[in-house]
Amino acid sequence: MKRNIIILPIIALLLSAVGFSAATAESGGQTALRAYYQDCINTCIMKLDSKAHYKNSECRALQREALMAAMKKMFLQRYQERLINKMVEEDIGQKNYKIEYYLDRQFYRVIHPRLALK
């Protein structure tokens, strides 16, 4: 009887340690995923920033491109944390084309709901 009393707390302690290490590993994976998404968004912001010089162009299409790039840049900067949380929640993955598609879809839903990509 005394032996069972000693063994049960040890088993409970071991099980809680295993559960804690699994939860820590999962949160560590999410931290890495969040950092990856943040890097992707920052890269996208840098690409959009490089289109800013088009605003001085004589071509109307390039001026519109610069305007859309500036709007998307502001959107990504303002809602970066919210976008990262949603990407983690929806399990977007780590493929660049999926991340860019997701960001574009979210941007166009805000700018013009009827133009949102489906």
Image: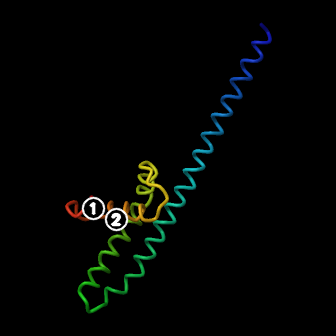
Q: CA distance from mark 2 to mark 1?
A: 8 Å
First in sequence, mark 2 or 1: give its number.
2
Amino acid at circle 1: Leu
Count how many numbered circles sit on residues in the image: 2
Who's the residue at 32% across and 61% down the image?
105
Residue 99: x percent and y percent?
A: 42, 62
Q: Does 21 appear above or below 96?
A: above
Residue nearer the viewer, 51 or 98: 98
Residue 22: x percent and y percent?
A: 62, 39
Q: Quadrant where the C terminus lies?
A: bottom left
Residue 29's disc is: none
In this picture, residue 109 sits left or right of residue 19: left
Amino acid at circle 2: Asp
Q: Which residue, as the protein is rendered here, is positioned at the far right?
A: 3
Who's the residue at 31% across and 90% down the image?
56
Q: Does 96 appear above or below 7?
A: below
Which coloring applies here? rainbow
In this picture, residue 75 sits left or right of residue 118: right
- Discs 2, 1 touching: Cβ within 8 Å: yes
Residue hosting label 2: 104
Q: Which residue, as the protein is rendered here, is positioned at the far left?
A: 114
Q: Which residue, as the protein is rendered here, is positioned at the far bottom?
A: 58
Q: Secondary structure at mark 2?
A: helix
Q: Quadrant where the N terminus lies?
A: top right
Q: Quadrant of residue 117?
A: bottom left
Residue hosting label 1: 117
Who's the residue at 48% across and 71% down the image?
43
Who's the residue at 37% across and 86% down the image?
53
Residue 54: x percent and y percent?
A: 33, 86
Q: Secondary structure at mark 1?
A: loop
In this picture, residue 51 sits left or right of residue 22: left
